[in-house]
Amino acid sequence: MESVIELSKVTKQFRGFSLKGVDLSVPKGYIMGLIGPNGAGKTTLIKLITHMIRPTSGSIRVFGLDVPSREAEIKARIGVVTDTPIFPDDVPLATIGSALQPFYPKWDKALFGRLLEEFCLPPRQVMKKMSLGMKMKFALTIALSHDADLIIMDEPTAGLDPVFRLQFLDRLAVLIQNENKTVLFSSHITSDLERVADFITFINRGEIVFSASRDEIREGWGVLKTGRDEIQPREVPGMSGYRTTDYGIEILTSRIGEARRLAPATAVCEPVSLEEIMVLAGKGGNHD
Amino acid sequence: MIDWLRKEFLFHRKVFYINYGMMIVYLIWFSSYSGSLNAYFSVAALMSGIMPVTFQAREDRFRLTALTALLPLSRDGVIRAKYATLWLLMGVGILFSLVVPFVSPLAKISPASLFSSGHPIAFLLLLNIATSFLFPFIIRFGWMGTMVFMVVIQLAGAVLFLISVLLRGQANPFRSVMRAMMGSIRYLMGHPITVSWVLLAAVAVFLLQYLSLKTSQFIYRRKDL
């Protein structure tokens, strides 16, 4: 499978937080969802890919090109939706489009107009009079208007109401029908990713916990529920986190088939949602 | 480069019109109020330097740094474009400053006196020294960081002034430095305009801006945005 984004042993050191040796590959033509709790490193990862910050070590390639040295070429083919608006507050939307148009060789003025209409964004409107949802739609309009091959979105659905969110996700699903388009989409709203993502990468405490297709997650991951003293979490193959409850212990595993064979007869194996994975493998679970 | 300048104008045109409108009105008023070339050029230099800084302040306010970082430009290209904007805006400021005494019927400054001394050259040099020194700071620390830096400089100046008063005496080092600075400015302003003097000033301006540009590129290449 051809990769659009390739990260190899990427680290980024901040005071109090570090991204540790991240290896990641985003396949062409798919939607990759990036999940993780707040402060896990999702935005840092996106900023590294878009060269807003520089890695401490490791290499990042986008479209097979080295990011720092081929920055301009790469960015002409990327559309980015950030978690907060990055456009001037007092400039009409049509003027912002007109100002950005010359930078992108494949800018489609007619498409820009159509998207404004589709998203109910008045061209003479200014950002300061728009809701967060409208601002996000405008950011997506800009990202789509230059026929970007890669769309990167950082928490685009956070703060959107359900109607806007569904419209937004539907637009992504339409976009990805073109096999040359790839989407990297970070969110902690797991239901959004379950709806649209083909691949899921889970990041926690600056480390990639797993990166797999949705089918692999559905088939491989599960929760083993049993009595507290019946099995030690460490004995469960693929254990990625566990929690004790009033009724026993819940152990998250990435090898549910093997775990089922080793588990005591009283144990129950259940499929797991992305939200449960995020909780048990993240801050809500124990890992020792 | 043209695309960048066009974008800057479209994003900041309200501020552009308001600031330059205010600058013209103020220069007309000031030239009618005082006939002092020293004062006129000091005010003109200050106002010509404000405009590029205003653009940068708006960039910080609206998080346009992130937008800039996402545009298909290299980091060195962004800095080149920012300096081109700086030079263009300073050029417009300088042009207005020189034109107002010619066109304003209220001006007490005679247009002939404008070029009879070294005032325009001194004005150009001082403006370039200030911007070439400040711009790398703005690139590194943003508008707020630069404001903090300016406040620290002012406080340091106040402390030095206090020490100077306490030391007294004609020979104290702070007074000597201040005298040397004022003497240099007076020398620049009083120097007659000759071809060699203009060429020397042009080389100085070019070198200052070139060094400033290279410093800013060095900083921006390594900056996390």
Image (cartoon, rainbow, N blue to C red):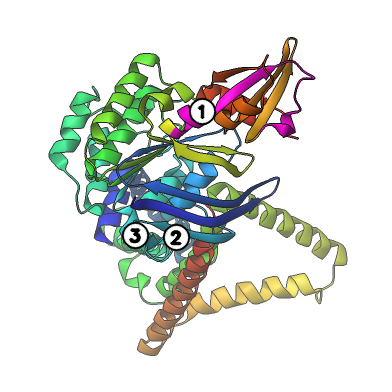
The residue at which mark 2 appears reads as B40
Relative to B195, B129 lies left or right: right
Q: CA distance from mark 2 to mark 3?
A: 44 Å
Residue located 55% across and 29% down the image:
A257
Is residue B26 shown to the viewer in this render?
no
Front residue of A172 and A266: A266
Query: Residue B201: x, y in percent?
Result: 43, 80
Numbered disc 1: secondary structure? loop
Numbered disc 2: secondary structure? helix
Relative to A249, A271 lies left or right: left
Identify the subunit bearing mark 2.
B
The residue at which mark 1 appears reads as A188
The quadrant holding residue B40 is bottom left
Residue located 48% across and 47% down the image:
A47
Name the amino acid type tagged 1.
Answer: His
Identify the subunit bearing mark 1.
A
Count neighbours of disc 2 (C-alpha within 10 A) and say few if under 14, some if 14 to 19, many if 20 or more: many
Query: Residue A206: x, y in percent?
Result: 61, 44
Circles 2 and 1, Cβ within 8 Å, touching? The answer is no
Q: Which residues are magenta?
A: A216-236
Name the amino acid type tagged 2.
Answer: Tyr
Residue A223 is inside the magenta segment: yes
The quadrant holding residue A92 is top left
Residue located 57% across and 22% down the image:
A276
The residue at which mark 3 appears reads as A72
